[in-house]
């Protein structure tokens, strides 16, 4: 309502700087029916979702696995942590030029950058979750003969699961942020491609359409992750029951 009042009713904001709701609806109708930046909206959304899913999945597998290993073994922490501390301060977007050199302007470079961005939160939170497990739980399990993969499956993963999901949420957020930045360079399809083309065309309404759909996709995937977390952590008491 405030958006409509400021842009249409009172004219406080010029349409060239911020689009009106009717202009955004027209842009949405145009990209849905006619297409923009090499494709219709559905095609762009699916492409961005696929890139995020691939980069996020690989990052989670690597990050959670390495975090469990480092949390379980002091030797693994001593071996991996120096390299990790060296690479961690490098912003994920700084990997874009190197990813392009390695993999070109295709989807592989974008997936690599998403992977780098999503890897760090999943690793850090998994490692922290393992180290926060009460020592007596691990000692009791080891006294009962639970060792190796059985210890990881029965003690470390369940005990660190809340922190693991915290890392997954942060990794998912980083994936979407990095995707848009990666798609601004050399992308043929995707929501970032729409943003890049609309900026070149000075098309504020289309920029707003792409931004809205980035928010919709990010919120939807976060909600799905929340449902998975609630299902996996059904044993954890809620605030009402605590």
Image (cartoon, rainbow, N blue to C red):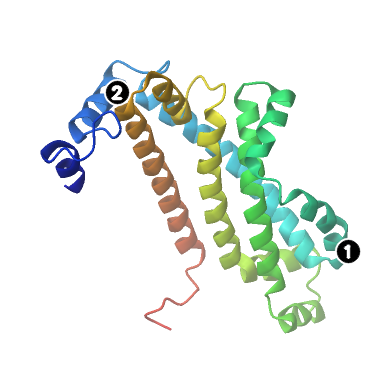
Question: x, y (%) of residue 64?
Answer: 68, 55
Q: Is residue 58 visible?
A: no
At 63% across and 71% down in the image, what residue appears? 159
At 29% across and 23% down in the image, what residue appears? 32
In the displayed structure, would residue 233 be above or below residue 5?
below
At 36% across and 25% down in the image, what residue appears? 41
In depth, the one of 79 and 91 nearer the eye is: 91
Residue matched to label 1:
75
Q: Which quadrant of the figure has residue 36?
A: top left
At 72% across and 72% down in the image, what residue appears? 131
In the displayed structure, would residue 233 be above or below residue 173?
below
Q: Where the C terminus falls, by quadrant?
A: bottom left
Q: Check the image and name the residue furthest to the left.
A: 9
Question: x, y (%) of residue 43?
Answer: 41, 24
Q: Which quadrant of the figure has residue 165?
A: bottom right
Left or right of 30? Residue 124 is: right
Specify the label residue 32 is tagged with. Answer: 2
Left or right of 78? Residue 160 is: left
Between the C-alphas of marks 1 and 2, the distance is: 55 Å
Q: Is residue 46 visible?
A: yes
């Amino acid at each position: 309502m405030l958006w409509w009042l400021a842009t249409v009713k009172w004219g406080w904001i010029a349409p060239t700087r911020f689009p009106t709701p009717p202009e955004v609806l027209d842009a949405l109708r145009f990209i849905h029916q006619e297409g923009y930046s090499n494709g219709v909206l559905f095609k762009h959304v699916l492409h961005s979702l696929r890139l995020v899913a691939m980069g996020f999945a690989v990052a989670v597998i690597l990050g959670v696995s390495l975090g469990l290993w480092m949390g379980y073994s002091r030797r693994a922490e001593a071996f991996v942590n120096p390299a990790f501390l060296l690479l961690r301060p490098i912003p994920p977007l700084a990997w874009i030029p190197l990813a392009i050199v390695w993999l070109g302007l295709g989807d592989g470079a974008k997936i690599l950058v998403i992977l780098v961005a999503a890897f760090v939160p999943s690793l850090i939170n998994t490692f922290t979750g393992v180290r926060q497990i009460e020592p007596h739980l691990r000692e009791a399990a080891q006294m009962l003969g639970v060792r190796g993969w059985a210890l990881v499956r029965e003690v470390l993963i369940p005990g660190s699961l809340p922190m693991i999901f915290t890392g997954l949420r942060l990794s998912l957020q980083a994936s979407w942020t990095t995707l848009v930045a990666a798609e601004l360079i050399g992308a043929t399809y995707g929501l970032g491609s729409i943003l890049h083309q609309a900026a070149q065309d000075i098309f504020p309404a289309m920029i707003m359409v792409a931004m809205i759909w980035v928010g919709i996709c990010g919120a939807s995937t976060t909600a799905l992750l929340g449902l998975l977390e609630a299902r996996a952590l059904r044993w954890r008491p809620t605030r009402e029951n605590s």
